[in-house]
Every structure is written in C-alpha cells, then in structure tokens.
C-alpha cells in the first residue's frame, strides 16, 4: 500500500496537469476576446519566448509584451477593429509534468475560425478564414502557480472560407514585422503543403521512446 | 477515510488521465503518420479495430494489418489528416483493469480521391475500450463511426459521404455503418450520471 507521502505526490501531479490545462484554455478565452494585457500576465517574468506562425521569436517577458501588445494589439491604446473575430479552440491537450514538479510541456491543437484583415495584421480587406495549427508550449511553476514559460504555435493552414486549404493554404502571411521586429526569425514556418510535421514532445507511453 | 480508500480514489483519477492521454497521443501519432507508434498503443490481447466501413479487424495481428502498411511510407506534403480528439468521456470499471471511452472527432483532411486531390470535412464518434496490463493502459478495442465525410465545397447536406470504402482483407464486414442522414445514434458506453440508467 502507498504511503501518505507517495499519495500526496501522485495527487499533486494530477492537480498540476489540471491547472496547466486550465491555464492553456483560459489563454484561449482571453486571446479570443483580445484581452492582451491579461494574456501577457499569464507569462512568467522569466518567460523564455513566444513564437507564433511566421512572426518570428520574441524573447523574454519584454518580448512577450512587445509581441502581444505592440504587434498583435497594435499598440497599448489601440481599439479592436469592428468586425474582427478570432476563435481559437484549444483542443486535445497532452500535458507532461517533469519529475521535479516545477516544469511542464503541453501539446495542443488550435482550431481557428476568424474574420480578419489579411493584407496586414490590422489593415486591408476582411476575410473569413478557417485555420489549424499545433502548440508545443512550456510551463513553469513559480510561487505555487503555473505560468507560461514558452509559447510556440506552428501554423498548418489559414485559408479563406470560400477556398479551403487545398486551394489556398495560407492567407494573411505577414512575415516578421518591420515596426515591431522579432528578436530572431521564425524557426518553424512550414505551413501546408510542406508536409513538415511538428515533432511531439512526449515519450511513447508504452515503449518509452 | 483510510489510506487504502484514498489510494483507490487517486488511482481512478490517474487511470482517467492516462487513458485520455493515450487517446490524444493516438491522435497526434496518427496525424503525424507515426504508425509504428500507433500500433504500439494496442494490447497484445487486442479484440478488434473497426474504422468506418473498412470492416472488423480482429486481434493484434490485425492491428498490424490495418496500420502496418503505412509504417515508414512517406506521405506527399499535400496529403494530411487533422483528426481532433475531442470531448472524451472515460469510465473505468470497478476492477480498475477495463475502461470505455467516447470521443468526437471533427477533422480536416486532404487525400487522393479518384486520382485527384480532394479537401474534405469529416466527423465521427469513437466508442473505444481500454485495458490495463502491467500497470499501463492500452487500446483493447477501437471503433470509429462515421457521421459524415464530405467535400469541402459541397457540405454534408449535399454529400454526406464521398464513397464507400470496405477493405477486402477485413475479418468481417462493418458492424455499424450508418452515416448521415440515417439518424443513427451510436450507443452510449456510459450510464446516465444522475439516474444511473
């Protein structure tokens, strides 16, 4: 029979997984409503980086702020453009907590429905789009709370509703911004139909490989 | 509460977590064309695999038959499956060795169809069974029911399924193949949580 200490450890791991799943899903709800300040606050002060699609790598907590507030929001006081909608369902999470209980990784699918401009992030004709991609994120536990340490989203496709991924794999490919430049170029910009599959972080549950 | 009861409760939660992970990992491996990894998720005592109208494949050998042909075969870049493993409901039997799982799978796909590339929407329902052996959860039975498989452009009302796809090497014909608009309800593996019926 297990000791109380062993049971506590096992229960702690389950609580950690649930809390990280909640963090990732809440990230989704905040981002969908453009609550970018709240999104930034989900990251640790020791955050490593954020990298999404072809925007490039933004490093450190300062980079996280530059990415979400300066680039994505379009500036601290910028109001969301009328008619813009972005829904990114956070699905199929597999969360792996390190034995030390302080660090974790998570893989998720992002399933997107958007109405957005595609000429640039904030300008141009609005299109309705379907999108899909993969998150491989890292989390850190500090002062008893789980936070993002690293967020990395690999975009598979972002297609106009009228066309589909076979006809138009990506619209709104803006590349690294000149006004809010990333700290490093994109590391995984291989959308459909490249055939590149974003590697899984987890070990096989049976073979351990 | 004594320690033994507490351990039972913790174990049940661990079991549910591990089974959910197993099903979601199956999804990632499948979509990434990692078919040896898929095969290794099945118990040596696998009962059967049944996918849409391909037919019933019995035993672990049949799992290899079903997925083995795709191991290491490169897929052209334009061909893909994104089958999102969603809304899992897991029930672990009181013995702690057997479990059932129900899942939805909205899917984006692109695959060859009559010599051309076709972009399709697909939706289906899993009723799966899992078994715990040597302390690990495995698939014991996998059954995926097709709801619709339609072209991107036309939609499920116009084209509920693009074609029938029975496999000639199946051990038995499909036991359930009732795509839209049949009105078929895939039986629930779980009991009503309130009435217990």
Image (cartoon, rainbow, N blue to C red):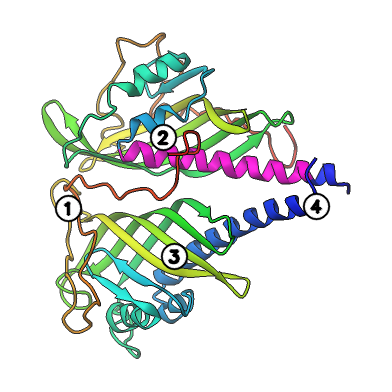
Task: Give the chain of mark 2.
Answer: B
Would you name the residue on which mark 4 appears?
A4
Contact check, label 3 and label 1, Cβ < 8 Å:
no
Are discs 3 and 1 both within one chain?
yes
Q: Is residue A128 above or below residue B177?
A: below
Task: Give the chain of mark 1.
Answer: A
Percent from the top left, x then y, of residue B183? 45, 29
- Please tell me the numbered disc located at residue A28: 3
Asked whether residue B54 is in view, the answer is: no
Task: Please identify the dominant SS of the magenta region.
Answer: helix
Looking at the rendered image, the disc whose residue lies closer to the viewer, 1 or 4, is: 4
Q: Is residue A170 above or below residue A186?
A: above
Task: Give the chain of mark 3.
Answer: A
Q: Earlier in the sequence, mark 1 or mark 4?
A: 4
* Measured Cα–Cα span from mark 4 to mark 2: 43 Å
Q: Secondary structure at mark 3?
A: helix
Looking at the rendered image, the disc whose residue lies closer to the viewer, 2 or 3, is: 3
Q: Quadrant of residue B55?
A: top left
Percent from the top left, x then y, of residue A124? 15, 75
Q: Is residue A206 above or below residue A202?
A: above
Would you name the residue on which mark 2 appears?
B124
Are discs 1 and 4 both within one chain?
yes
- Please tell me the numbered disc located at residue A169: 1
Q: Secondary structure at mark 4?
A: helix
Percent from the top left, x then y, of residue A95? 50, 53
Percent from the top left, x then y, of residue B116? 11, 32
Query: Which segment did they paint magenta?
Result: B7-32
Residues A84 and B171: in front is B171
Classify residue B8 as left or right of residue A149.
right
Q: Quadrant of residue B112?
A: top left
Asked whether residue B96 is in view, the answer is: yes
- Dot 4: few (<14), some (14–19), or many (≥20) neighbours within 10 Å? few
């Amino acid at each position: 029979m297990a000791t109380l200490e062993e049971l506590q450890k096992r229960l702690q791991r389950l609580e950690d997984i649930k809390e990280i799943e909640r963090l990732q899903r809440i990230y989704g709800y905040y981002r969908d409503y453009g609550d970018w300040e709240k999104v930034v606050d989900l990251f640790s002060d020791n955050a490593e980086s954020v990298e999404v699609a072809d925007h490039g790598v933004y490093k450190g907590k300062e980079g996280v702020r530059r990415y979400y507030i300066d680039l994505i929001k379009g500036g601290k006081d910028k109001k969301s453009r009328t008619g813009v909608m972005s829904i990114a369902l956070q699905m199929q999470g597999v969360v792996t907590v390190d034995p030390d209980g302080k660090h974790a990784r998570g893989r998720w699918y992002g399933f997107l429905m958007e109405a957005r401009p595609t000429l640039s992030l904030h300008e141009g004709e609005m299109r309705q789009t379907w999108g899909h991609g993969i998150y491989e994120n890292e989390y850190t536990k500090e002062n008893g709370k789980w936070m993002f340490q690293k967020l990395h989203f690999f975009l598979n496709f972002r297609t106009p509703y009228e066309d589909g991924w076979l006809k138009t794999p990506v619209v709104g490919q803006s590349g690294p911004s000149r006004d809010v430049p990333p700290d490093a170029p994109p590391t995984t910009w291989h959308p459909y139909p490249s055939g590149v599959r974003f590697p899984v972080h987890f070990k096989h549950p049976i073979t351990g490989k | 509460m004594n320690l033994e009861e507490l351990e039972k409760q913790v174990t049940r939660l661990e079991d549910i977590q591990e089974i959910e992970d197993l099903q979601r990992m199956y999804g990632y491996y499948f979509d990434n064309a990692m078919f040896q990894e898929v095969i290794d998720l099945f118990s040596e005592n696998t009962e059967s695999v049944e996918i849409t109208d391909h037919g019933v494949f019995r035993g672990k050998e049949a799992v290899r038959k079903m997925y083995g042909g795709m191991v290491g075969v490169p897929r052209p870049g334009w061909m893909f499956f994104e089958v999102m493993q969603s809304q899992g409901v897991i029930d672990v039997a009181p013995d702690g060795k057997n479990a059932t799982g129900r899942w939805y799978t909205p899917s984006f796909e692109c695959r060859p169809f009559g010599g051309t590339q076709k972009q399709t929407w697909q939706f289906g329902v899993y009723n799966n069974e899992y078994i715990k052996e040597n302390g690990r959860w495995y698939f014991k039975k996998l059954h995926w029911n097709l709801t619709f498989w339609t072209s991107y452009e036309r939609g499920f009302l116009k084209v509920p399924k693009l074609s029938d796809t029975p496999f000639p090497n199946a051990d038995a014909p499909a036991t359930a193949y009732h795509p839209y608009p049949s009105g078929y309800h895939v039986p629930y593996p779980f009991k009503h949580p309130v009435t217990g019926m």
